Image (cartoon, helix red, strand yellow):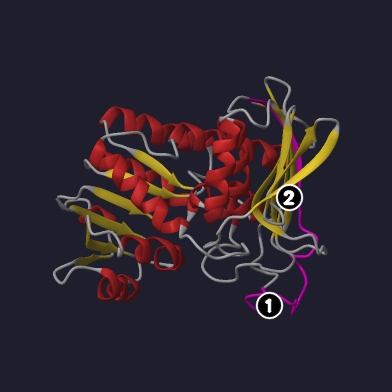
Amino acid sequence: MSLKIGIIGCGGIANGKHLPALSKLAIVELVAFCDLEVSRAEAAKKAFGTEDALVFTDYQDLLKLDLDAVHVLTPNVSHAPLTIAALEAGCHVMCEKPMAKTSKEAKAMIEAAKRTGKKLTIGYQNRFRTDSQYLHTICEAGELGEVYTAKAHAIRRRAVPTWGVFLDEAAQGGGPLIDIGTHALDLTLWMMDNYTPKYVVGNAYHKLSGTKNAANAWGPWDPEKFTVEDSAIGFVVMENGATIYLESSWAINSLDVKEAKTTLMGTKAGADMNNGLTINGEEHGLLYEKKIELETGGVDFYDGAGDDPAFNEAESWYDAIVNDTDPLVKPEQALVVTQILEGIYESAETGQPVFL
């Protein structure tokens, strides 16, 4: 059995994550590639496609093929329309994170999946890291007790993506909050198994974006094109009283850098991902810290080596399709992430809490 797969968007996330992972799966055939720049689609076909794979510049032409699944790997602004079109064409859809620019769009994606009976998942590959999987097992077993407060970390000191449309608010909907903060928030909500936010408050900063010739991992950015925030901070209160502090930045004057990590504080114990995975608590009248030795890694700015979250994500997704089970990342969960991020941006604009 083999599944025929189409790729919409052949840029950085396609070549850096999805296509290398999919090429390792014997069950899939990459038979169609679409990109507004035909040269990128041609290059993707040459590197990863079948010999007779087709190339398109219009996604509607790609969706006329008999495909089993489609990967939507485009700027955030097009996630919803492309995903809905693919679902209505009879395809299962893996859409890159974040789910959509707005919660309204995300809800429409879920409605389309339900209407068509097709599966939909969102690309939160950090759930598939070894440390994430281990910590989630601990949380599910109740070893931390009630996790009533947490921190979601997505801090880069100077690593602003200067290619593509990352700096374009109209295309992306935001900067580090929606780009990398979304990963940290998804991890935190998943560990807490809490998807009922009550209200959020936050702020977005444009403090360093105007700097000319700034030191940066990917070279200086153009201040004229930097229309998104350079940092954003949010505070989330859940319906049951639990709280989450969310921090995100592409550029900030701090040495306390960490990305796609979470800190959990429960009634029985706590967990910290920031320097490897550590569990802390109190037992028999004494405090303890237990360092968990795991082989981890495989994502940008995450120290360690061992497993491959992108491959694990792809393998899990196609197992769900073949065995007709729910994907690990459910679209209803990704919707809550989008709702919270949207609320933080709104709070930053209005200066008021946003009730969800």
Is residue 340 toward the left or the right of residue 202 in the image? left
In the depicted structure, whether residue 267 falls above or below residue 30: above
Quickly name the residue at label 1: 220
Q: Dividing the image into 4 quarters, which one contains the C terminus? A: top right
- State the extent of the magenta-drawn residues as a range: 197-221
Front-most of 147 and 38? Answer: 147
Q: In the rendered image, is residue 254 in sight?
A: yes
Q: In the rendered image, is residue 151 in sight?
A: no
Cα–Cα span, label 2 and label 1: 20 Å
Residue 43: give its label: none
Quickly name the residue at label 2: 232
At x 75%, y 27%, the residue is 267
Q: Residue furthest right?
A: 285
Is residue 119 toward the left or the right of residue 184 in the image? left
Q: Residue furthest top?
A: 240
Disc 1 packing (10 Å; few <14; some 14–19; many ≥20): some
Q: Earlier in the sequence, mark 2 or mark 1?
A: 1
